[in-house]
Amino acid sequence: MKRRLSIFLSISLIIAAAAVMVRVSAAPSAGKAAAERLGIVYPTVIAHRGASYLAPEATAPAYILARDLGADFLETDVQRTSDGVLIAYHDETFERTTDVAVRFPARAKNPVADFSLAEVKSLDAGSWFNARNPERARASYRGLQILTFEEVIAIASASRRPVGLYIESKSPELYPGIEYDIVKVLAARGRLDARRTIFQSFSGESLGVFAKAAPAIPRVYLIDEKMEKETGWKNLVRAAAGSGAGIGPVGYVAYPWNLGAAHRAGLIVHVYTVDAPWQFSALNFFGSDGFFTNRCDLLMEYYGRRPGMAPGDILEKFKY
Ligand code: G3P
Ligand code: CA
């Protein structure tokens, strides 16, 4: 992944120089104006599944760290359990980041939606991280639970500093009506705030449902390589402009002329998922208005924003 992105960015840097000469890029302020119109912090630090380089993704320490390091938004993928509870989880199954194969061997490959909340809460969503990243392992990560969506909201809200939620309807075709469920939970928690909530999806249909359920909340259309290849950037920008306020391309398609076209359509552009400082520099030069990142600590530093506390101190403070 990193090697591919490095090669892509090296080639793109050369192309970018030519692009600047022929003035195909939008003015750097174009994205800023769109963000300001929406009341969204610019440039934007979006903690992808929390501070997920330093702690197991989408768990309490990952989100608490991201919040207290100073990220603008906590990014979360939302799915629904068999008994109708919204949870913060990315994958289609629990295999990669939990002990589901030990606890429920016959159902390990079953989709997320086949498990009740009690079953989901019985999984260990932290030990995989220690095994995979011994240099960042902590005893307290063992046995961490998958969070409900409400628990993520509670973490974002338990801070004097405004911290936003950047909420993805993950595989929305599997969860009819999940957009309304998300809006209902946000409303109950007093979090339907257009400056601190953004909906995101790879599904234009899902964004359309969000638009009906909560028209004031900004929506960002996520774009992967396959979509760019099959649909074409121009059509995707048109769709994004029709269904929301922004576009969220994967780094591989974040060419400067693509970002320029999005800015000219009045869209904000948040590129995913970018973790290295030199990649922040290159894509910032290309026009990205912010990043989804697993390294919100590094992105904060890149933007010249110093965290109040060191990651280790934050983890200690919250007994992790
Ligand atoms: O939501 C932005 C980015 O997270 C999209 O990719 O697969 O990590 O959800 P993914
Ligand atoms: Ca996501």
Image (spheres, rainbow, N blue to C red):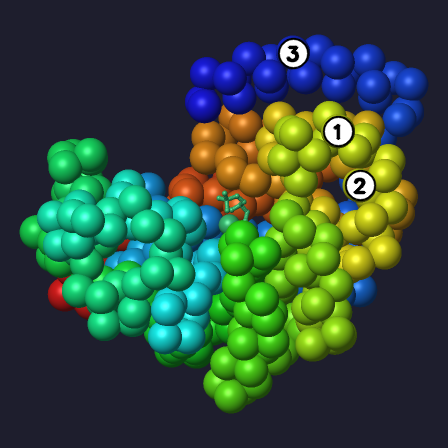
Residue 13: image x %, image y %? 67, 16
Counting residues from the start of the chain, the first of labels 2 and 3 encountered is: 3
Residue 270: image x %, image y %? 64, 46
Q: Which residue is drawn at 85% across and 39% down?
A: 235
Q: Distance between the residues labelled 1 and 3?
A: 22 Å
Residue 102: image x %, image y %? 12, 48
Q: Amino acid type of disc 3?
A: Ile
Q: How far apart are marks 1 and 2 (CA)?
A: 10 Å
Q: Residue 212 carries which label?
A: none
**Residue identified by numbered label 2:** 236
Counting residues from the start of the chain, the first of labels 1 and 3 encountered is: 3
**Can residue 39 be spotted in the picture?**
no
Q: In the image, which is nearer the foreground, mark 1 or mark 3?
A: 1
Q: Tag 2, which secondary structure?
A: helix
Q: Tag 3, which secondary structure?
A: helix
**Residue identified by numbered label 3:** 11
Relative to 183, residue 18 above or below: above
**Can residue 153 be spotted in the picture?**
yes
Q: For residue 291, which quarter of the picture?
A: top right
Q: Amino acid type of disc 1?
A: Glu
